[in-house]
Amino acid sequence: MKTWTKYPFVRLLIPLMAGIILSKIAGSIVQFPLYLVAVPLIIIPFLRFLPEKPGFKSRWVYGLLLNTFLLLTGYQLYALKQMQGNDHFSKLVAGGFDAISGIVAEEPSERANSHRLVIKVDAVYSNGRHTTASGKIMVYLPKDSVAAAIRYGDRMVFAEPPAGINGPSNPGEFNYSAYLANKNIYHQVYLRSGRYQVIGHNYGNALKSFAIGIRNNFLKIFRDAGIDGREYAVAAALLTGYDDLLDPDQRREFAGAGAMHILCVSGLHVGIIFLLADKLLFFLPKRKKSLWIRPVLILLVIWFYALITGLAPSVLRASLMFSLVTIGGSLNRKSHIINTLSASAFILLLIDPGMLYNLGFQLSYSAVLGIVAFQPPIAKLYTPTHKVPKYIWDIVAVSLAAQIATGPMSLMYFNQFPNFFLITNIIVIPLSGILIYSGLAFALLAQIPVISGWAAQLLVLEFKILNYSVAFIEGLPGAVARNLYLSGPSTLLLYLLILSLFAWLVQRKIMWFRTSLALVALLALQLGYQKYQNHARHEIVFHKINGGTAISLTQGTQHTLILDSALMANPGRLTYPLNGYILKNKLKTQKVLLGDSIVQQKNLLIYRDFIKHNNINLAIVNSSRMLPDSAQSIKVDYVLLQPRDRIQVDVMLKAFPEATYIISGNISRRKADYLKTELMEKGAKIHSLRDDGALIARL
């Protein structure tokens, strides 16, 4: 109990987080009135009037009521955040509308084929009436000069009906709809050129507009100095967190080398700024009357840097944490960093409970907790006597601590592990500090003609060294362990095992050792069951891929992937829809071209457009010419329809009377709707890949 008293905000944070998690699990199934949240707090004063007041031994009653209040608060905050009220635009446009008006809520981002932005709807126009509305829409615009000029705070009007965001179309596919739902975005729309208008500017939050303006001006200084290409992209990401300019190769290199964290402005960057401000303000007087000057100036420096980054969420988290550290230090309050960290998380979750499911939130807090918990015991393993080895060992200890804390989560989300992360961090952590200081100094010296030119050349050289170092490490043999998979339950068990082993190493209590052994056994059982499931898997999957046909025949870990010529020639299109399925089930994939070929393997026969897999027969129908004579009928379990011309439905039903008809996702909407209507009228079994997603037939 004495240990818990040191961390009051940890005790407050746990029930709040538990309530948020319960709310997400329960969804809309379990609801209760808002006033119920206050009931536990209302009960506490009445305990004083009981004939026998709770004594010291019954103090748990107060704790129970407070924890219940925080749990209900977290539950209700998340439920309210996800709730769509009667003024939500989706309800207002259901009966028809003339136009939707909204404000660009985030700085637009440029993608390979489009511009993407989030619109916060504020009005719906219908029958000449204006109705105040709420809700967010993900908007995609084609690349042109009008879309490129749109900025945060612009007001847009359009008349296209927004569509709901569907869940994953294929097994193992990334759940983009859930990702956007955590941001309260449930609809999307693609607006062609000329189908929307920008009718005003500067309607956004004044502080956020000011911050984005500062960031853009800061980056303009670099562009005006002639810094461009890969160096400018890394400078924008490292100094301000603006990573839209990074090309795919740069992202792959930094991720593979284990250096992606330096491009995501967060605790490391704000910590460097905090230390810089602390060192530069050493000369300020320490008299009682002026003690407040130094912390106030440090806070101003921290939040000015937050403005330079455009008030990115990760920077806000780190800035809040270092602000609490600064304020606590100025008040001579010696609070443990874990308590300070918990306080910042508590405040942020009260403001936005959905942040708990944000990957950046999870990784940044895990990394700091890992450094605080694991770095001291790791550092004690070796005590260098000279400054250089000590500096290197400090980086190694911090890197190991952060990797222990974030490694399982990174495996679960990214399916890869940077094997040479220690070498990378020994190089990039000092270099990133130098680059941050150099970048800020350059911004101050940019108006001095001669010095600015030299400073720009030096800065470009530093970024070239960073890019070369990262690319070199990522290119080393065995630098990255790819295609790894860790399930959610396994990740949780692994974290519990890490914590119990750490507790055992620190406290040397047999209880923690036994707990660790039990967790090892549970983890082994979990992984064993997962392996059993993989080997017992026997299924056919008709994948939904626009403009292509992909069929998975899976037996155990053997995976035959049947592709048409379009997908065989462009395998990159398979990455997003299929990689998760292959990784999760640890499949050994063999690709087979569908068409005029004969493939005969164990339990598999492919003859042109007919496939026999064990006892399952499949036919692929492209036109009526492929159908057998009307007098014949063939026992086929599945018929995949991807017609190039009109199919005689009656003839097909006689030919394949017992089949389930699968309407391909790579035919036009008009053809798909025609086939669906005709087959439904005849009472056939139907599955539309376009409308229903992939079909999984477990055998």
Image (cartoon, rainbow, N blue to C red):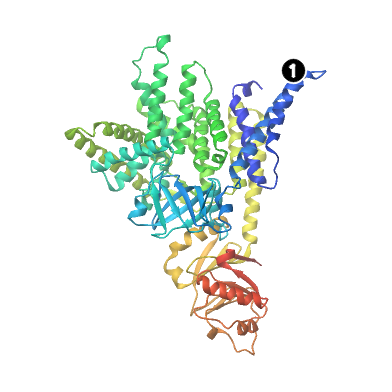
Residue 511 shows in the view: yes
Badge 1: few (under 14), some or many (20 or more) residues near its Cα, within 10 Å? few
| Quarter of the figure with residue 674 | bottom right
Q: Secondary structure at mark 1?
A: helix
Q: Quadrant of residue 182?
A: top right
Give the left or right position of residue 602, taking residue 267 as reference.
right
**Relative to 249, residue 234 above or below:** above
Image side of residue 523 versus residue 578, left or right: right
Task: State the residue in front, 461 or 503.
Answer: 461
Report the front residue among 248 and 28.
28
Residue 296 is situated, as x and y percent measured from the top left of the image, at 41, 21
Q: Where is residue 454 shown, x and y percent of the image?
A: 20, 36
Q: Residue at x 44, y 33 (%)?
A: 267
Outermost residue toward the right? 51
What is the number of callouts on the image? 1
Type of residue at label 1? Phe
Q: Residue furthest front?
A: 128
Please say whether residue 493 is visible from this viewpoint: no
Q: Nearer the viewer, residue 675 or 228?
A: 675
Depth check: give the residue in front, 423 or 62: 62
Q: Quadrant of the C terminus?
A: bottom right
Quarter of the figure with the N terminus: top right
Q: Could you tell me which residue is drawn at 45 percent across and 30 percent down?
A: 319
**Percent x, y of residue 252:** 40, 50
Query: Residue at label 1?
Result: 56
Question: On the rendered structure, is 248 left or right of 502?
Answer: left
Tell which residue pokes out farthest to the left in this image: 450
Residue 146 percent across, percent down from the top left: 35, 54
**Position of 301 relative to 51 (above/below):** below
